Amino acid sequence: MQLEEIVNQSLTVEIKTSKTDQDFVKQIQQRLSLFRLYPGGRWIDGLYGSRTEAALLTFGTTLGLNSFNLGKIDRTFAQGLLNTNPVDFALSFAKNRPRIFQDFQQLTVGFDSQRLPILDIGYLKSPYPLDINSYSLRLKEKPDYQEVISLGAMAKLNNPVRSVTFNPYPAIGQLPTIDHNGLNFLHSDVTEACVVVGSFVEGEVRTRWLGKSAMTPVEMWSSTKFISLLYLISQINSRFINCDVDNCVIRNPNNGAVYPFFDLVSDIFTYDTKISTSNALAAMFKRFNSWVGLEVWLKKMTGNSNLQFSGRYGELPFINTPELVDRKLNQTVLKSVAEGNIGSNSVSAYDLTRMISLLGWHYHIPANARLPGAQWDSLESLARAMGKDTARHLDFAIDKLALTSVISYPVVLSKMGFGRSTIRNRTELVYTGLIRFIDKRTKPAKLRTMALTLRAAKGLNNEDEEARQLDARMGAEITEILRRLITEELG
């Protein structure tokens, strides 16, 4: 017996009589392995056991094929096994959100708060380390409206069917209109979130903003570290338009030691500590303005007057009086300033999402919306560094949805934040990211892009279990957001 016979002859076979047919069972196992419901290799042995039965049950339940529940495989079920596209199946399977969370939880077994399987895996174990050097060009590309299109100014979304409008990216200091009910589907562990979906209209990115307590200033841990780097680039290029930070070094005026800018910035995201700790380096890069001055600047950028951004990251700066020197121009382009009063860091999910989108969409937003003075030659250096973030939740989401083979030219930028608050007696995990890729499932293909920030919290009086659950939860929720982006439900 073969599945094709069942289809061609409109047969219905009893499982109890056909499960001894090893060739038939082997064919079923091979099909199930394509849907990631059954392991491959030596497990495809033609022996019908509980693993095969469970996989068949999951397959039928996911696609609403009920004959297997009656102990039978009919023509419709066989057609499903033969003809269902693995990506389409993965997108349907991912609607079972408790199961997706459970799958991610399985990854955390044996890990603890000091090391987690997604948060700490590192970019070298990502599918995309060789893509990072191409980010500069990819982030400049636009749809050609022939082979690649975008959603347009108005899009018809699914589930429920509705039309939404994408608005121009807001000018610097102007708050966007945020749909504060647009992320109500997120799990209750996600306490704050903001997502902005981008759509190209006549070569320009237009946006639709969604939020869940998106404007609430909270502790975002290390996820804010990239903000001071954007400030630095804005200041440098406002004074020296031809300065490319890849040509720059940080100099310690006390001993003359110099360190390449990109190496220092990379250390912040990789946590490799090749030069110093991420916390000490992030504190150092805040020294090019007073603590309060940097906060004032950020408020002007995002339009959120309630944020605070005048704190360190738990460590003293690697160099307290750094100087930024452009070796190509042969001059000092920026020096540290008087510190002033140190405060705290408390920003919103919106603030982080706005700032990372300013980086990733720089080439495609109006001049009055861009980071003042910033030039792409410098910004792309930061983009490459953010491609090296240790946390890979977007990568795991791509894999979970079986999208790897159907997307091209991916860009994944991110910055994680993680810590346990003794005041709130809970562990908190933050992930801010930007993704951009070509979805090849349709012709013409579609360019899809979004920026997001999620903050999740868990208080169980057990920091290791809190950490494990949060790593899994972040993976599951970002998978759901990406699924909705792909299926055009998000918006």
Image (spheres, rainbow, N blue to C red):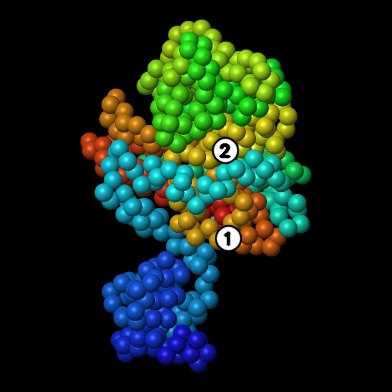
| Of residues 194 and 232, the one drawn nearer to the viewer in this rendering | 232
Residue 172 position (above or below residue 69) = above
Please name the amino acid that badge 1 sits on.
Val
Q: Secondary structure at mark 1?
A: helix
Residue underneath mark 1 = 406
Q: Position of residue 23 (x, y in %)?
A: 39, 86
Residue 325 coordinates in the image, percent (x, y): 60, 18
Q: Residue at x 65, y 62 (%)?
A: 442
Circle 2 sits on which residue? 384
Disc nearest the viewer among 1 and 2: 2
Q: Assign a secondary structure to mark 2.
A: helix
Q: Identify the residue at horizontal 28%, vertical 74% (top origin).
A: 50
Q: Residues within 10 Å of mark 1 (few under 14, many from 20)?
A: few
Point out residue 260 in the picture as x, y percentages from the top left corner: 54, 26
**Residue at position x 68%, y 28% in the image:** 375
Residue type, label 2: Arg
